[in-house]
Image (cartoon, coloured by chain):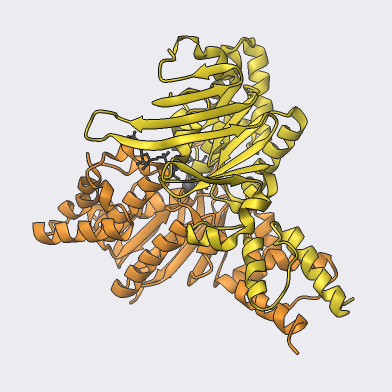
Amino acid sequence: MNEMIKVSHLTYAYTQNSQPALDDVSFTISSGDWVAIVGHNGSGKSTLAQALDGLIDFKLGNIWVDGTKLTEQSVWTVRSNIGMIFQNPDNQFVGATVEDDVAFGLENMAVPHDEMQARVDEALSEVHMSDFRRKQPEQLSGGQKQRVALAGVIAMQPKIIILDEATSMLDPVGRREILGVIRKLKKRLGITVLSITHEIDETTDADKIIVLNDGKIVSTGAPETIYSHSGLLLKLGLDVPYSQRLKRELTQRHIKTPETYFDEEGMVDWLWQSLLKK
Amino acid sequence: MAITFKEVTYTYSPGTPFEFQALKNISTKIEDNSVTAVIGHTGSGKSTFLQHLNALLKPTGGTVMIGNTTITSETSNKNLKPLRKKVGIVFQFPENQLFAETVEKDIAFGPENFGSTAEEASKIAKEMITLVGLPESVLSRSPFELSGGQMRRVAIAGVLAMHPEVLVLDEPTAGLDPGGRREIMQLFGDLQKKQKFTIVLVTHQMEDVANYADHVIVMEHGKIVKEGSPRAVFANVEWLHEKQLDVPASTEFAFEMQKRGFQFTRLPLTESELADDIADFFKKRGQTHE
Ligand SMILES: Nc1ncnc2c1ncn2[C@@H]1O[C@H](COP(=O)(O)OP(=O)(O)OP(=O)(O)O)[C@@H](O)[C@H]1O
Ligand SMILES: Nc1ncnc2c1ncn2[C@@H]1O[C@H](COP(=O)(O)OP(=O)(O)OP(=O)(O)O)[C@@H](O)[C@H]1O
Ligand SMILES: [Mg+2]
Ligand SMILES: [Mg+2]
């Protein structure tokens, strides 16, 4: 069995008379996959992440993580497999210093002291925050906080990493770099990654995209499949890849563009073929 | 309202082991009735710079002139209320500025504090919540029981409700969904054109810089390393790459086309500029379809 996460008919409302934040949500995620979750503000993404981490007391539906059904009894086991980054890094910090904070998860896992030190050092260096190790989390800039939060899960090396808009405050180059670090780690250790994001370019490399709308899954599929429904994405308040946006602009200018999905490189290539190739 | 920085330095926790100089000798002028974008890496000093715009932080050295109020390290907090009415800030983490028990009270607080009646303030709250794309039903809810993007929108509504003369926005679209991003930036742009106030924003979205800013300030390690119009700043793609900064996607795309032999008289900044250029290439080649 290589289902790392299975969610079945999960329904949850924060209060009795509010609309459910999650409404009959079912999906599975295979071990080692990178899955992106997209959806408008308030569509239920963070609620879903918290449900998987056992932080929400849902009554309807079931969740299995690495074969274990999530219950009151199993919640600690389940949580020990998940490295979660919250949307607001301020809700994440527990340590008095940056290095304590990164070490925290490892202390809980009873990692031997020497190994812990080594992993903390490596994680901080991967996110370029080694110089800040003795600082207090509240003395960091927004992006630095997110880097430290990411170092925490990198050091932990969990089976599953859940990123709730974990790079929203990084500059674009920094963002790509840090995602590269996680991608490398995922590949080396076979980690399953769930990434909640509003950045379309963070979804292009995903194995699967899940689209949430008002607490319901409206679409699931490979990036190319999802992107080819650009009308639906725009209607849901979402984005389409840059190359698709450019295609729309070109179509408006009566230029016939290829039907299939091209990334930017593919588009440049197509333009070169159509215009410059002798 | 114009703002002038003269040789401003700022040091956090001076005289402690945590001492850190976050701004180094900053001099610049933010024109009245303009949109200025501040870009730069993590930790380059952008938020520190912004917090000087309403004297939330006071320079360790140098002076900041906000309209005709001069702020130095000596300035006391006493007489700053009129300034705080004129300059509204949306912080990088909106949670940090939400405080009231309901969304309505949160948005109405500013107007009431500066002289509106409770009734007027509540009417303003209704208008503002609609402007930022949330349903009126949110008004009676606690601001702390909202999603991240919804909180951001409430924080923006609260600051807009004060009709500030300077609107300071620290990554205002981080956490907004793409549709919300477009709408909120459009809202800022429209309001600015209509009411002719001053906007200063930090952003990592180079598209927004290209579309909305008159002036760009590039920060690195607490210094301003370049400033000018978006066209001037983004013209030098190689320099920006070297500095590990991005250019707008359309500029980057054109830059890649250039490498393949296409010639641009000036690099496009936006999708529509790029599409126009490409349409021209097709026309020249005589291959326009349909
Ligand atoms: N603590 C809470 N109490 C009551 N309602 C809540 C709470 N947290 C979230 N909600 C509501 O539940 C719905 C889903 O919220 P959730 O935070 O999961 O959205 P999201 O998809 O993560 O949005 P965003 O992109 O803005 O972060 C929203 O309508 C929100 O207002
Ligand atoms: N309270 C503080 N005490 C000490 N140093 C601080 C404090 N706040 C910020 N700094 C440091 O000052 C520098 C500038 O921080 P600032 O928040 O201005 O950066 P920024 O450009 O806004 O970054 P980001 O894009 O990550 O938000 C950073 O190196 C940061 O670590
Ligand atoms: Mg969320
Ligand atoms: Mg900042």
Near-viewer residue (B68 or A67):
B68
- Residue B222 relative to residue B275: left or right: left
Is the N terminus of chain B in the top left, top right, bottom left or bottom right quadrant? Answer: top right
Q: Label the orange chain with its letter.
A: A
Is residue B231 in sight in this rendering?
yes
Q: Among the chains, which one is yellow?
A: B
Quadrant into which the C terminus of chain B falls = bottom right
Q: Quadrant of residue B279?
A: bottom right
Seen at 44% across and 53% down, the residue is: A167
- x and y percentages locating residue B19 in the rendered image: 28, 34
Question: How many numbered marks does the figure carry?
Answer: 0
Residue placed furthest toward the bottom: A278
Q: Quarter-wise, where is residue A34 in the image? A: bottom left
Q: Residue sitting at 73 percent across and 78 percent down?
A: A258
Residue drawn at x 63%, y 37% is B134
Say whether residue A253 is left or right of residue B61: right
Asked if residue A124 is positioned above or below residue A228 in the image, the reply reads above
